[in-house]
Amino acid sequence: MEWHISPLGDGALLAEADGDHAAANRAALAAAAALESDPPAGMLAAVPAIASLLVCFDPLRGDHGAIARRLRRLLGGPAPAEGEGGRLVEVPTRFGGADGADLAEAAAALGVPPERLVERLCAEPWRVMMIGFAPGYPYIGPLPPELHLPRRATPRAAVPPGSVAIAAGLAGIYPARLPGGWHLLGRTALRLFDPAADPPAALRPGDMVRFRAEG
Protein backbone atom coordinates (compact mmCIF):
# COMPACT_ATOMS: atom_id res chain seq x y z
CA MET A 1 0.00 0.00 0.00
CA GLU A 2 1.38 3.40 -0.98
CA TRP A 3 0.33 6.79 0.39
CA HIS A 4 0.41 10.03 -1.60
CA ILE A 5 0.48 13.27 0.40
CA SER A 6 -0.40 16.52 -1.32
CA PRO A 7 -1.12 20.08 -0.11
CA LEU A 8 -4.61 21.54 -0.21
CA GLY A 9 -3.84 25.24 -0.10
CA ASP A 10 -1.66 26.64 2.68
CA GLY A 11 -3.51 25.05 5.57
CA ALA A 12 -4.19 21.40 4.78
CA LEU A 13 -2.57 18.15 3.68
CA LEU A 14 -4.41 15.27 2.06
CA ALA A 15 -3.00 11.72 2.30
CA GLU A 16 -4.54 9.25 -0.17
CA ALA A 17 -3.83 5.52 -0.39
CA ASP A 18 -3.38 3.19 -3.33
CA GLY A 19 -4.34 -0.43 -2.72
CA ASP A 20 -6.46 -2.22 -0.13
CA HIS A 21 -9.12 0.19 1.16
CA ALA A 22 -9.75 -1.87 4.29
CA ALA A 23 -6.10 -1.68 5.39
CA ALA A 24 -5.87 1.98 4.28
CA ASN A 25 -8.89 2.85 6.39
CA ARG A 26 -7.43 1.19 9.48
CA ALA A 27 -4.15 3.06 8.93
CA ALA A 28 -5.94 6.40 8.41
CA LEU A 29 -8.01 5.94 11.57
CA ALA A 30 -4.92 5.04 13.62
CA ALA A 31 -2.98 8.02 12.26
CA ALA A 32 -5.88 10.39 12.97
CA ALA A 33 -6.11 9.09 16.55
CA ALA A 34 -2.36 9.56 17.05
CA LEU A 35 -2.50 13.12 15.73
CA GLU A 36 -5.51 13.96 17.91
CA SER A 37 -3.85 12.57 21.05
CA ASP A 38 -0.56 14.39 20.37
CA PRO A 39 -1.30 17.18 17.88
CA PRO A 40 1.52 18.97 16.12
CA ALA A 41 1.73 22.74 16.53
CA GLY A 42 -1.09 24.50 14.74
CA MET A 43 -3.15 21.43 13.90
CA LEU A 44 -6.87 22.14 13.71
CA ALA A 45 -8.33 18.76 12.73
CA ALA A 46 -7.48 15.29 11.43
CA VAL A 47 -10.38 13.93 9.37
CA PRO A 48 -10.21 10.30 8.21
CA ALA A 49 -12.20 8.98 5.26
CA ILE A 50 -12.44 5.55 3.65
CA ALA A 51 -8.92 5.54 2.18
CA SER A 52 -7.60 9.01 2.95
CA LEU A 53 -6.78 11.41 5.75
CA LEU A 54 -7.16 15.20 5.72
CA VAL A 55 -5.05 17.19 8.19
CA CYS A 56 -5.98 20.85 8.62
CA PHE A 57 -3.68 23.32 10.37
CA ASP A 58 -3.06 27.01 10.93
CA PRO A 59 -0.29 27.91 8.44
CA LEU A 60 0.89 30.71 10.73
CA ARG A 61 1.54 28.27 13.57
CA GLY A 62 2.13 24.90 11.93
CA ASP A 63 5.18 23.75 9.98
CA HIS A 64 3.94 22.31 6.68
CA GLY A 65 7.02 20.12 6.18
CA ALA A 66 7.09 18.84 9.75
CA ILE A 67 3.42 17.86 9.63
CA ALA A 68 3.94 16.07 6.30
CA ARG A 69 6.91 14.13 7.72
CA ARG A 70 4.92 13.15 10.81
CA LEU A 71 2.07 12.02 8.62
CA ARG A 72 4.38 9.86 6.51
CA ARG A 73 5.83 8.21 9.61
CA LEU A 74 2.39 7.43 11.00
CA LEU A 75 1.07 6.03 7.74
CA GLY A 76 4.26 4.17 6.86
CA GLY A 77 3.94 1.52 9.56
CA PRO A 78 1.80 -1.62 9.48
CA ALA A 79 -1.96 -1.05 9.62
CA PRO A 80 -3.69 -2.10 12.86
CA ALA A 81 -5.43 -5.47 12.85
CA GLU A 82 -9.10 -5.68 11.88
CA GLY A 83 -11.37 -4.77 14.80
CA GLU A 84 -8.54 -3.34 16.89
CA GLY A 85 -9.17 -0.27 19.01
CA GLY A 86 -12.87 0.49 18.41
CA ARG A 87 -16.01 0.03 20.46
CA LEU A 88 -18.47 -2.73 19.60
CA VAL A 89 -21.93 -1.21 19.09
CA GLU A 90 -24.98 -3.41 18.60
CA VAL A 91 -27.65 -2.05 16.26
CA PRO A 92 -31.04 -3.79 16.71
CA THR A 93 -32.79 -3.68 13.35
CA ARG A 94 -36.24 -4.56 12.03
CA PHE A 95 -35.63 -6.06 8.60
CA GLY A 96 -38.12 -6.24 5.74
CA GLY A 97 -41.69 -5.03 5.54
CA ALA A 98 -42.27 -1.29 5.45
CA ASP A 99 -38.95 -0.75 7.25
CA GLY A 100 -36.93 -2.55 4.57
CA ALA A 101 -38.74 -1.81 1.33
CA ASP A 102 -35.86 -3.07 -0.85
CA LEU A 103 -34.98 -6.27 1.01
CA ALA A 104 -36.71 -8.71 -1.36
CA GLU A 105 -35.46 -6.92 -4.48
CA ALA A 106 -31.90 -6.67 -3.13
CA ALA A 107 -31.87 -10.36 -2.18
CA ALA A 108 -33.11 -11.32 -5.64
CA ALA A 109 -30.37 -9.24 -7.25
CA LEU A 110 -27.80 -11.02 -5.09
CA GLY A 111 -29.32 -14.43 -5.85
CA VAL A 112 -30.13 -15.33 -2.24
CA PRO A 113 -33.31 -15.54 -0.12
CA PRO A 114 -34.02 -12.39 1.95
CA GLU A 115 -33.34 -14.26 5.19
CA ARG A 116 -29.88 -15.23 3.92
CA LEU A 117 -29.05 -11.60 3.11
CA VAL A 118 -30.06 -10.56 6.65
CA GLU A 119 -28.16 -13.48 8.16
CA ARG A 120 -24.97 -12.54 6.33
CA LEU A 121 -25.24 -8.86 7.25
CA CYS A 122 -25.72 -9.80 10.91
CA ALA A 123 -23.09 -12.55 10.95
CA GLU A 124 -20.16 -10.40 12.05
CA PRO A 125 -19.32 -6.86 13.09
CA TRP A 126 -18.34 -4.31 10.45
CA ARG A 127 -16.15 -1.24 10.92
CA VAL A 128 -17.36 2.37 10.77
CA MET A 129 -14.94 3.52 8.07
CA MET A 130 -15.97 7.17 8.14
CA ILE A 131 -18.73 9.61 9.02
CA GLY A 132 -19.96 11.71 6.11
CA PHE A 133 -22.75 12.78 3.74
CA ALA A 134 -24.77 14.09 6.71
CA PRO A 135 -24.00 14.57 10.43
CA GLY A 136 -23.78 11.14 12.05
CA TYR A 137 -24.09 9.10 8.83
CA PRO A 138 -21.76 6.07 9.14
CA TYR A 139 -20.14 4.34 6.18
CA ILE A 140 -19.81 0.76 7.47
CA GLY A 141 -17.80 -2.05 5.91
CA PRO A 142 -16.19 -3.19 3.81
CA LEU A 143 -18.90 -5.77 3.16
CA PRO A 144 -18.02 -9.10 1.50
CA PRO A 145 -18.50 -9.46 -2.28
CA GLU A 146 -21.72 -11.45 -1.81
CA LEU A 147 -23.34 -8.29 -0.37
CA HIS A 148 -22.15 -5.90 -3.10
CA LEU A 149 -24.86 -4.03 -4.97
CA PRO A 150 -24.66 -0.78 -6.96
CA ARG A 151 -26.73 2.16 -5.82
CA ARG A 152 -30.35 2.30 -6.93
CA ALA A 153 -30.87 3.65 -10.44
CA THR A 154 -33.37 6.18 -9.05
CA PRO A 155 -32.66 7.68 -5.60
CA ARG A 156 -35.50 8.35 -3.19
CA ALA A 157 -36.33 11.95 -2.35
CA ALA A 158 -36.71 11.06 1.32
CA VAL A 159 -35.50 8.08 3.37
CA PRO A 160 -36.80 7.69 6.95
CA PRO A 161 -34.35 8.19 9.84
CA GLY A 162 -32.86 4.96 11.18
CA SER A 163 -33.03 3.20 7.81
CA VAL A 164 -30.35 0.53 7.38
CA ALA A 165 -29.17 0.26 3.78
CA ILE A 166 -26.43 -1.19 1.59
CA ALA A 167 -24.74 -0.07 -1.63
CA ALA A 168 -21.28 -0.06 -3.24
CA GLY A 169 -19.87 -2.63 -0.82
CA LEU A 170 -20.88 -0.67 2.29
CA ALA A 171 -23.74 -0.44 4.78
CA GLY A 172 -25.15 2.82 6.06
CA ILE A 173 -27.68 4.07 8.59
CA TYR A 174 -29.61 7.26 7.81
CA PRO A 175 -29.44 9.59 10.84
CA ALA A 176 -32.31 11.80 9.65
CA ARG A 177 -34.89 12.06 6.90
CA LEU A 178 -32.65 12.45 3.86
CA PRO A 179 -32.55 11.76 0.13
CA GLY A 180 -30.74 8.54 -0.69
CA GLY A 181 -30.05 5.93 -3.34
CA TRP A 182 -29.04 2.95 -1.20
CA HIS A 183 -31.09 -0.25 -0.89
CA LEU A 184 -33.25 -0.15 2.26
CA LEU A 185 -33.11 -3.43 4.20
CA GLY A 186 -34.51 -2.42 7.59
CA ARG A 187 -34.73 0.22 10.26
CA THR A 188 -33.29 0.78 13.73
CA ALA A 189 -34.57 2.86 16.63
CA LEU A 190 -31.01 3.84 17.52
CA ARG A 191 -30.63 7.61 17.30
CA LEU A 192 -27.56 8.30 15.19
CA PHE A 193 -27.26 12.04 15.75
CA ASP A 194 -28.38 14.29 18.59
CA PRO A 195 -26.94 17.83 18.55
CA ALA A 196 -27.66 18.19 22.28
CA ALA A 197 -25.66 15.06 23.19
CA ASP A 198 -21.95 14.84 23.93
CA PRO A 199 -20.73 13.56 21.56
CA PRO A 200 -23.60 14.31 19.16
CA ALA A 201 -22.89 11.30 16.89
CA ALA A 202 -23.71 7.84 18.29
CA LEU A 203 -21.03 6.19 16.13
CA ARG A 204 -17.49 7.27 15.36
CA PRO A 205 -14.86 6.09 12.89
CA GLY A 206 -13.22 2.89 14.09
CA ASP A 207 -16.27 1.57 15.95
CA MET A 208 -17.40 -1.95 15.08
CA VAL A 209 -21.12 -2.28 14.31
CA ARG A 210 -23.01 -5.54 14.71
CA PHE A 211 -26.52 -5.55 13.26
CA ARG A 212 -29.01 -7.67 15.21
CA ALA A 213 -32.33 -8.74 13.66
CA GLU A 214 -35.35 -8.16 15.86
CA GLY A 215 -39.01 -8.93 15.33
Image (cartoon, rainbow, N blue to C red):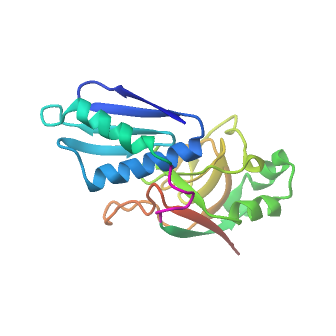
> Can residue 7 be seen here?
yes
Which residues, given as a range, are shown in magenta? 79-86
* Residue under the image location 72 percent in, 45 percent down: 148
Residue 2 pos. (x, y %)? 51, 33
Residue 164 at x, y = what percent? 61, 57
Compared across the picture, whether 38 is left or right of 110 comes to: left
Kindly identify the residue that appears in the image at 24 percent across and 35 percent down.
66
Q: Quadrant of residue 125?
A: bottom right
Residue 52: image location, x then y, percent: 46, 38
Q: Is residue 81 magenta?
A: yes
- Say if 121 sits above or below 166 in the image: below
The quadrant in which the N terminus is found is top right
Q: Hey, which quadrant is residue 70 in on the image?
A: top left
Residue drawn at x 29%, y 32% is 12
In the rendered image, is residue 131 in sight? no
Q: Pick out the residue farthest to the left.
A: 60
Image quadrant for the C terminus?
bottom right
Q: Nearer the viewer, residue 8 or 195?
A: 8
Q: Residue at point 47% right, 57% down?
A: 206
Residue 37 pos. (x, y %): 28, 56
Q: Above or below — where is 98 with respect to 52?
A: below
Q: Quadrant of residue 41?
A: top left
- Confirm whether the magenta stretch covers residue 108: no
Q: Is residue 158 above or below residue 87?
A: above
Between residue 142 and residue 189, name the one nearer to us.
142
